Image: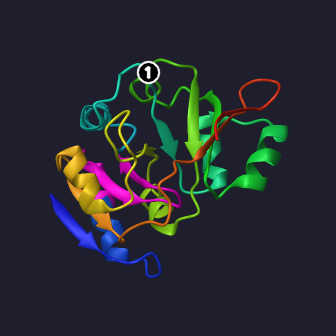
Amino acid sequence: MKIIKTTLDSVDENIINEAINVLADGGIVLYPTDTVYGLGANIFDKGAVRRVFDIKQRNLLKPLSILVSNVDSIDLVAKVSLSQKEIINSYLPGPYTFILQKKPIVPRAVTSGSNHVGVRVPDNEIACRLAGIFPITTTSANLSDEDVLSNPSEILTQLGRDVDLVIDVGELKSNHPSKIIDLSMRNPKIIRK
């Protein structure tokens, strides 16, 4: 495991490239978002996705969300109507995950066989740049049903240090995951506040 210390203010191209290489090789990256630290894996690498479930000790029937680099990229992984796009554009980038109907390109391993997928575009340049070549998983970096921590060293202690690369920007101001809004139904529904 490699830990790279940096800041949210200066996004180092070398760090981004190194992290993308780790993800492309099936590795897991612990990275900051605008809410909490996340665990990232290339969504197209089934083994890497499975590792995220294993690291979190997460039930395989609970789907993972996807992080894409920008709002326009949501169309790559989900079917988005004009009315859904209007809602999404008013909230993203930001601390929200939107549930949408997935496109066939999204692997079943990510969505646990569901026809829907949670999609995020955080207000965090590091996170968005990591998804610049392919979408990545985005799930809070904690053991399932345990506290969500905001300090990388505490997170690694809780997880058992089973990640390949850590982008450490220090303690985040938040320890609350993103709000989840289900747009897959006629009337939007808040799933997690």
Residue occupied by mark 1: 112
Is 75 displayed left or right of 140 in the figure?
Answer: right
Residue visible at 43% across and 77% down?
A: 11
Residue visible at 31% across and 65% down?
A: 167
Q: Is residue 66 visible?
A: yes
Three-letter code for the amino acid on which mark 1 is drawn: Ser
User: Where residue 50 sits: x, y (%)?
Assistant: 28, 31
Q: Is residue 155 above or below residue 107?
A: below
Q: Quadrant of residue 76?
A: top right
Q: Quadrant of residue 51?
A: top left
Q: Quadrant of the N terminus?
A: bottom left
Q: Is residue 183 above or below residue 89?
A: above
User: Where residue 58 sits: x, y (%)?
Assistant: 33, 29
| Residue 38 belongs to magenta span | yes
Q: Is residue 27 visible?
A: no
User: Where residue 103 sits: x, y (%)?
Assistant: 58, 29
Q: Is residue 77 above or below residue 68?
A: above
The number of numbered discs placed on residues in the rendered structure image is 1
User: Where residue 111 sits: x, y (%)?
Assistant: 47, 26
Secondary-structure class at tag 1? loop
Residue visible at 47% across and 63% down?
A: 129
Dot 1 surroundings within 10 Å: few (below 14), some, or many (20 or more)? some
Is 124 displayed left or right of 141 in the figure?
Answer: right
Residue segment shown in magenta:
20-40
